[in-house]
Image (cartoon, rainbow, N blue to C red):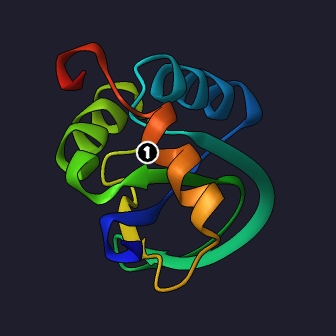
Amino acid sequence: MTADFCVALTTVPNRERARAIARTLVEQRLAACVQMLPIESVFTWQDRLEESAEILLLIKIKRADYAQLQQAILSLHDYETPEIIALPIVEGSAPYLEWIKATTRRKSQE
């Protein structure tokens, strides 16, 4: 059952954008929960070394919803090439995973 769930990650430039994306994903029932963490990133962009304060979103989802989640994030994101990745949940509390499943059940899935 754990293979049915994952944690998606994306970074955004500020708390306002983070809240907007988080609220939309939860309201659309694509995510059960979105956590927002301030981070510092060091990366190469367009052949230049960059350092940036960002907000990391940890997004709990059903794996089957990843494509829709990605499209939703892309429609709301400020970055030209945003990080949108998913990491499988390999172990998890059964009640918590059931909560993700129940919380992300959209009307079309009932």
Does dot 1 land on a helix, a strand or a loop? helix
Which quarter shows the C terminus?
Answer: top left
As drawn, 88 above or below 24: below
Residue 37, percent across and down? 79, 55
Q: Which image quadrant for residue 52?
A: bottom right
Q: Name the residue under label 1.
A: 101
- Camera-side residue: 90 or 37? 90
Residue at figure coordinates x 25%, y 45% from the top left: 65
Residue plotted at (65% across, 71% down): 93
- Taking the image as shown, residue 9 lies to the left or right of residue 110, namely right
Circle 1: residue type = Lys
Tell me residue 1's x, y (percent). Answer: 36, 72
What residue lies at 30% left-to-right and 30% top-to-bottom? 72
Image location of residue 57, percent across then percent down: 61, 51
Q: Which residue lies furthest to the bottom in this view?
A: 90
**Foreground residue among 45 and 16:** 16
Look at the picture and state if 48 lies above or below 110: below
Query: In screen coordinates, is 55 left or right of 20?
Result: right
In the image, taking residue 45 as reference, residue 95 lies left or right, namely right
